[in-house]
Amino acid sequence: MSASVGPKLIPHPRQAGLVSSATLAINERIRQLALEGKEIFNFGLGQSPFPVPQTLIRALRENAHQKDYLPVRGLLTLRESVSHWFRRRFSLEFDPANILIAPGSKELLFLIQMALDCQLILPSPSWVSYHPQSRMAGNSTIWIETKESDHWNLTPSALRKTCEGQLDGKTGLLLLNYPNNPTGATYEDEQLAEIASVARDMGILVLSDEIYGEIDHKGRHTSIARYYSEGSVVTTGLSKWCGAGGWRLGVAAFPEALSELADRVAVMASETYTSTSAPIQFAATAAFEENAEIDRYLTNSRKVLEFVANYLHRELVSCGISAPAAAGGFYFFCNFESFRGQLEARGIADSHALAEALLNDIGLVTLPGAVFGRRKSELSLRLSYVDFDGESALTHIRSIDSPDENAAAIICPRIKLAMEKLSGWLESANLNYQ
């Protein structure tokens, strides 16, 4: 009798070349290296360093008994709170009926792409999961190269020039993310208005991922939906501005003109995730209601992030690394091209090799630019500046009001040490090359 080899597994063509999300894969690797006792400076996974606000923790505790399946679109009181929040914070009008709640905005981004026969339009660099989601949905991607001189932002002229004659009768879906992951950049109102004008003129649908909107460092986030209300879907969630990534709660808000698309996504949700965790939805309502504690939490979180970003930017520039200043979120997209000669002399010729060398040599965890849609040969990295104790930083917020040379040692000591190690590593590269 021949040995059983099991069923024959034939992967779908849409899975060809797909690998684990780079951000989640590096997190698993960090855990393993930590278990092995290696000192790690985690500039990899973009997870909020701040604790979940006590208001939400109390609300979750009080609703732990909630056990019923909730509506596919989400708890009505939560959707009403989200609707009021959009109006209060961003002057946007969304009917609660056109707001969907899901276990993470990532799920909603994917289902929206699944609901459309589209070409996804992506500025490069772009978050690691947008393009793989497009492939899994059976769609194709139009990449638009951006420039460091533009802070890696999409320009209206590049959008028009790249997409003219390229949509082939399909829906053009521009996925705009800002404050941006991986660059930390955001858009001025005038830039958003110009992009909106091009999108409207070309009949392009905008999927605006504004998950970092509330941690714009100045608290001045504006949604592109202000300028293109009929053609913009806005997504957000609790992970970045409430420190609740593991709670997995996301939001998508559709204008009335796109209610048919909201209906399609809700149908697919009913056949996939059914509904979002009931206790989480009841607790999340507190995050979107007018609340002095949440307002203080956000004000102080922004203040800490702006301080850390400014400190880190000064350190990077002093090392000779090029990176536009960050305006929101917690990322820098760094260019090491000025070190190419020295690095190539050490066998480092692309972003993957650079990230690996920094991890092996000094324990600095970064992500290569190639996973964000950049050319593999480009010496670019994303740094996520979250390796500090957010709760401690919030308690030492006064150190930021009159910062001295010791402020970084109080607020973000591990980031300070990581920059010292990086500076030493680059100096060693120069010496070895010379």
Image (cartoon, rainbow, N blue to C red):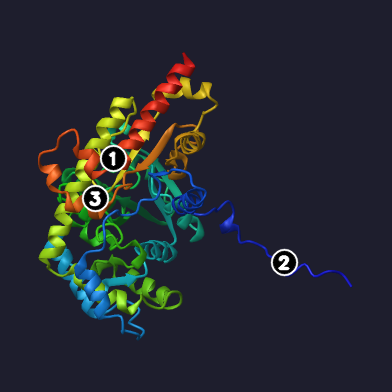
Query: Disc 3 marks which amino acid?
Result: Ala
Q: Which mark is residue 8?
A: 2
Between the C-alphas of marks 1 and 3, the distance is 11 Å
Secondary structure category for the residue under label 3: helix
| Mark 1 or mark 3: whose residue is earlier in sequence | 1
Residue beneath the point at 47% across and 40% down: 370
Q: Quadrant of the N terminus?
A: bottom right
Residue 304 coordinates in the image, percent (x, y): 20, 47
Residue 275: image location, x then y, percent: 37, 77
The tag on residue 155 is: 1
Q: CA distance from mark 2 to mark 1?
A: 48 Å
Visible residue check, residue 164: no
Tags 1 and 3 touching, CB below 8 Å: no
Point out residue 315 in the picture as x, y percentages from the top left corner: 28, 31
**For the residue marked with disc 2, what is the amino acid?**
Lys
In this rendering, the label closer to the viewer, 3 or 2: 2
Drawn side of residue 86 relative to residue 423, left or right: left
- The residue labelled by disc 3 is 196
